[in-house]
Amino acid sequence: MVADVFAALAGLGFGATIGLVITGETRGSLAAPGGWLIAGGRLAGFTGAYLMLIMVVLIARLPWLERAVGQDRLLRWHRRIAPWPLGLIAVHVVLITLGYAQLAKVGPLRQLWAFLTTYPDLLAAAVGFGLLIIAGVTSIRMARRHLKYETWWVIHLYIYLGLALAFAHQIVTGGSFIGHPLTRAIWIVLWASTAGTVIVFRVLHPIFRNLQYRLRVVSVRPEAPGVFSIICSGRSLRRLAVSGGQFFHWRFLTRELWWHAHPYSLSALPQPPYIRVTVKGLGDQSRSVAHLKPGTRVFIEGPYGAFTRHARSSERVVLIGAGVGITPLRALLEDLPPSVDVTVIVRGSTQEEIVHRDEVAALTAQRGGQFHEVIGPRHLVRFDARALRRLAPDIAQSDVYVCGPKGFNESVIGAARRLGAHRDRIHQEAFSF
């Protein structure tokens, strides 16, 4: 319902954007040399700018949107939209340059140089567009695989700088604003609202809440090869309102780690004044957490994610996890109502890789559920539809929660679908960026 309302509002705004641009054109402007090219460029530019603002809102971490949709789905929408604004803004540059070149009766390159050297704010807009292109290129799956999470995160901060540079260009030099104060006012409100949303929910709100929590590291302990739990203590943790399966963005305030955040799921429900997260050493930050000192200040943002008990629609649940993906399932298992019939399946190359194995087994036994381990190398011990049917014969009538590496998730979800599990009852959390 929330997603439908958001989509409807975004669609109305999109239609209004196109309408304002079209009604801003006149017969005289279209009949002038290059008029149609300039009009097409304006339409492409305004449409691309609007879609870019929608992309920012999707990742602005609005609490009501996060709870209803989940950050995983919002990120998928963000990535699906991303090529369109970049492409439209590129079309805007090309068409406007060609149109003004025809109007001035000069070559396209000369006109482009004139834009950059004589038009207010166009050089800044060109720099902003370059930053957006860099962010877009580094988001391509092939490029993303070769980047550390920290590098990718820093590059994407430049999206905000790129948009800020583009805003001045659009408001100051946009032909559609000349003699159209209503259009100018609407776009100023759009830009200001988007910027305000980001400032409030990505900066001010987290700062205010962390001043309440005052989290500090209490201890760090090994759980499995390369996997560590960080236990923190704080104040007012009952106000977190977190559900099992959700995650926070964590900043450990040391000289090396304070400047970037990573998404880590809770591996247990908070037990005030304590809270626990379990991390696998994959990137620079996650490897460094093994050496955190007691007393280190911790900054968190969240909770985020719809991978919770609220997503289920049946009284039968199958939890399937691999590697560090078992950690949110452990918290989810703790949070499920007692009436729910639970089957837990964990996967690892060795039993030592099963994170929080004893805790998960004990929680499952307390509920009278079924606990299964699939141990062994993937090429020797297969975990396919046949194995899944044997371990969870009622999977077609169950809600299925899957958490692990992307390839594992895709394989398990495919097997569950072949066994009759309904798509709306399959919930996943993937550890990727």
Image (spheres, rainbow, N blue to C red):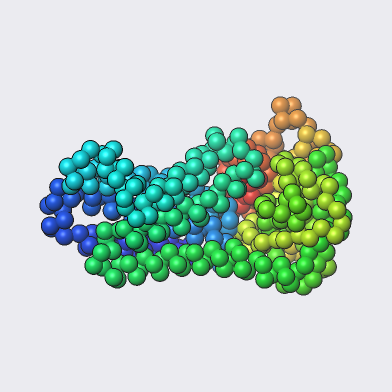
Looking at the image, how many numbered discs can be counted on the residues? Answer: 0
Q: What residue do we see at 71% from left, 67% from top?
A: 210
Q: Is residue 172 visible?
A: yes
Quarter in which the C terminus is drawn: top right
Q: Quadrant of residue 105?
A: top left
Give coordinates of residue 38: x percent, y percent.
Answer: 23, 50
Q: What residue do we see at 83% from left, 68% from top?
A: 273
Q: Is residue 397 above or below residue 201?
A: above
Q: Quadrant of residue 209?
A: bottom right
Q: What residue do we see at 60% from left, 48% from top?
A: 153
Give coordinates of residue 152: x percent, y percent.
Answer: 59, 44
Residue found at the far front of this picture: 118
Residue 167 lies left or right of residue 61; in this view the side is left
Give coordinates of residue 15: x percent, y percent.
Answer: 31, 61
Residue 19 lies left or right of residue 370; in this view the side is left
Q: Is residue 391 visible?
A: no
Give coordinates of residue 37: x percent, y percent.
Answer: 22, 47
* Depth order, front residue of 23/104: 104
Q: What residue do we see at 31% from left, 58% from top?
A: 173
Residue found at the far top of this picture: 379
